[in-house]
Image (cartoon, rainbow, N blue to C red):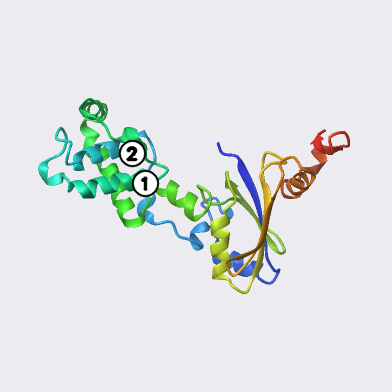
Amino acid sequence: MPNWIRNKLIVSNTFISELQKYHCKYDEFNNIYFDFNTVIKLPKELEIEISSKSYDGLKLYLAKINPSFKEYGEKKDKWIIDEYLSLIDNLKKTRCFFDNFLIDQNEIKAIITKYKDNINEVEELGRKMIQNYKDYQYMNWYDWCVDKWGTKWNSYNTKIGFNYLMFDTAWNPPIPLIIKLSKLHPNIKMALLYSNENIGYQTGFMLITNGTVDLEGTFKDESIDAYKLAFDLWDCGDSYRYDEGIGTYVPK
């Protein structure tokens, strides 16, 4: 499980209803959530599984199109050598690619044995990943979400207040997404506050207008300001006390 980040997006009270109308949805349990897809939409093609199976498929497909690898794939499947090498160089720049995806004949045999009658399905996953990279410069949703949204998943645990939207994200605040949201509503001043669920860590703020960051900053871990922001966002101040000896807060 990830560490959750609590985010508080503050806007004018007159804009909060518009934010809810255009950027919030309801899930299958009728819970409201801030839908990142209303700001930057994740391409449907990238919503493929990320697993050992899909990575085995990538290994198979790369072997199939590799013009220097004769043990798997037919002649008609092979790419031109320069095109193939260019693809590999570009894939190495992504988060989801490792050198062990380039395999030998023994590994090919092991994968074929592992999946048996489902080998075509597995290889198709690899083909889709390469096609996604050609179309979107991303093989799957994970890399895309981290780059475009700033976090790997959509929002969670959304709450709407008088002039704010509170929601959680995995590992990091969705800073690229908030910048894009600000561009969509150029006349609205926005403030983003955030804090890790590990109280006193990974805290910060951003003031933004029309996609331009007017002011931003982070607080030193375990500093007074870091704790105070975390107390506000996580509503946990009663569980801590100020220790004059070390000059900051500690759990009670």
Tag 2 residue:
54
Pick the quarter of the image with the N terminus: top right
Q: Residue at x 25, y 40 (%)?
A: 62
Tag 1 residue:
48
Q: Residue at x 60, y 51 (%)?
A: 173
Q: Residue at x 59, y 72 (%)?
A: 186
Pick the quarter of the image with the C terminus: top right
Q: Is residue 20 above or below residue 47?
A: below
Labels 1 and 2 touching (C-beta < 8 A): yes
The answer to whether residue 245 is visible is yes
Mark 2: few/some/many CA within 10 Å (<14, 14-19, 20+):
many
Q: Is residue 244 above or below residue 179?
A: above
The answer to whether residue 53 is visible is no
Image location (x, y in percent) of residue 155? 56, 51
Q: Is residue 7 above or below residue 1?
A: below
In the image, is 142 to the left or to the right of 168? left
Nearer to the camera, 65 or 12: 65
Nearer to the camera, 210 or 57: 210
Specify the quadrant of the image occupied by residue 249.
top right
The residue type indicated by label 1 comes to Ile
Mark 1: few/some/many CA within 10 Å (<14, 14-19, 20+):
some
The residue type indicated by label 2 comes to Ser
Image location (x, y in percent) of residue 12? 70, 69
Image location (x, y in percent) of residue 40? 48, 61
Q: Residue at x 24, y 37 (%)?
A: 60
The local secondary structure at tag 2 comes to: helix
Along the polypeptide, which appears first: circle 1 or circle 2? 1
Disc number at residue 139?
Answer: none
In the image, is 166 to the left or to the right of 139? right
Q: Is residue 87 above or below residue 183?
A: above
